[in-house]
Amino acid sequence: MNALALTDHGTMFGTLDFFKAATTEGIKPIIGLEAYVAPRSMLDKDVSRDKKPYHLLLLAKNMTGYKNLLKIASVSQLEGFYYHPRVDKAYLSEHTEGLIGTSACLAGEIPRALNDNDLAKAESSLTWYKEVFGPGNFYLELQDHNIPELFRVNRLMVELAKKTNTPLVATNDVHYARKEDADLQDILLCVQTGKLLSDTNRMRMSDDSYYLRSPEEMQSIFSQVPEALTNTVLIAEQCEVDLTRSSYHLPKFEVPEGQSPESFLLDLCQKGLRQNIPDRVDSPEIQERLKYELGVINQMGFAEYFLIVWDLCRFSRERNIWYNVRGSGNGSLVAFALDITSVEPLSYHLLFERFLNPDRITMPDIDLDYQDDRRAEVMEYCNQKYGADKVAQIITFGTLAARGCWTRDEHSPGGS
């Protein structure tokens, strides 16, 4: 494969890792999302009418499309979530610039209408999507798996494409890379849904075809509709999204008039050292270490980062909000001078290079822990000072590693 798309259900958590992995291997990454479209408004949450949203595949053609994908994914989680992260047609219609859409799997709006023999609804839905996405930006999708309804829907999809002059695209519903991974993916499904492999009434794939089929396999399966295969190349050629980071983007920190971030940081450090270690502030050891650290910080463009963290700590002290610094940031004399940490690193022979190293260009990582019942105050201060669009919460993903998986030996109570 010389191009590959990632379209996770309702999220884009894997986008950056996918982009880096694909470009490293010389594969063109196509950034996408399998969105959930609410049957009505995404604010409607009636279990009898809104529990089963439609699937819709979205691919970014350019950076405008990528930004729209981010907006769709975010609003789906923050405003439309109901069993699934959902968006509605009203929001979608305002955020389709730079996007390619497809009718998705059997859970899509058009395939579902075809499966219900509602050909009129299928055609009217297709008309809406084509108008919203614009000429040439919406495709009817064909898949091939061991699902009885799928063969009939595919036939109707081809007929609908001819009737409405809509391009087809052939895809595979990929959930694992190799065919032999089917059993492992089935185990993961059991873990995800809290079921046993022996349970007969549980979520499972229809067969073992949900892998990354080769071009030869796809050509054999869809030989009667070759344009559906060539259109995959056409789509790949249209998608040009570059997520390569050339620099870091930090919020703008306002410094006093006549000062630069670098000069203001130096003044704060000298003032802090005079207050914290007045008897040693002028020693060659302290001043040489300070000069060295500031040189590295300024060379790497992180003066504003230290000022931002200093300001958060200053705010916390003034409001009597408890905080603590853990990790390698305690090895920085600059952090000590700014009262970010109370640890004076030279007395404990702590290395600055463990924290920040010009030979390993990464962002400084000062870990601040706040008391849990007042953490929201610090976040609100960040929102007000830098703007809500500059502040975000992060997520931690739990993963399954081999060392965390075990099986019980029924013949040995203590064995595994």
Image (cartoon, rainbow, N blue to C red):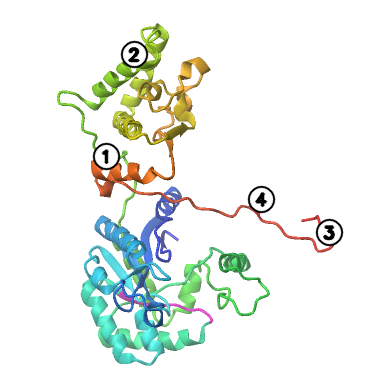
| C-alpha span from label 4 to label 2 | 51 Å
Label placed on residue 251: 1
| C-alpha span from label 3 to label 1 | 59 Å
Residue 141 is covered by the magenta coloring: yes
Label placed on residue 412: 3
| C-alpha span from label 1 to label 2 | 29 Å
- Looking at marks 3 and 1 on the same chain, the residue that comes earlier in the sequence is marked by 1
Q: Position of residue 26 (x, y in %)?
A: 42, 51
Label placed on residue 403: 4
Residue range (magenta): 139-146
- Badge 4 marks a residue whose secondary structure is helix
Q: How many marks?
A: 4
Q: Can you tell which of label 3 and label 4 is closer to the viewer?
A: 3
Q: Position of residue 39 (x, y in %)?
A: 33, 79
**Residue pushed farthest right?**
411
- Looking at marks 4 and 2 on the same chain, the residue that comes earlier in the sequence is marked by 2
The answer to the question of whether label 1 and label 2 lie on touching residues, with beta carbons closer than 8 A, is no
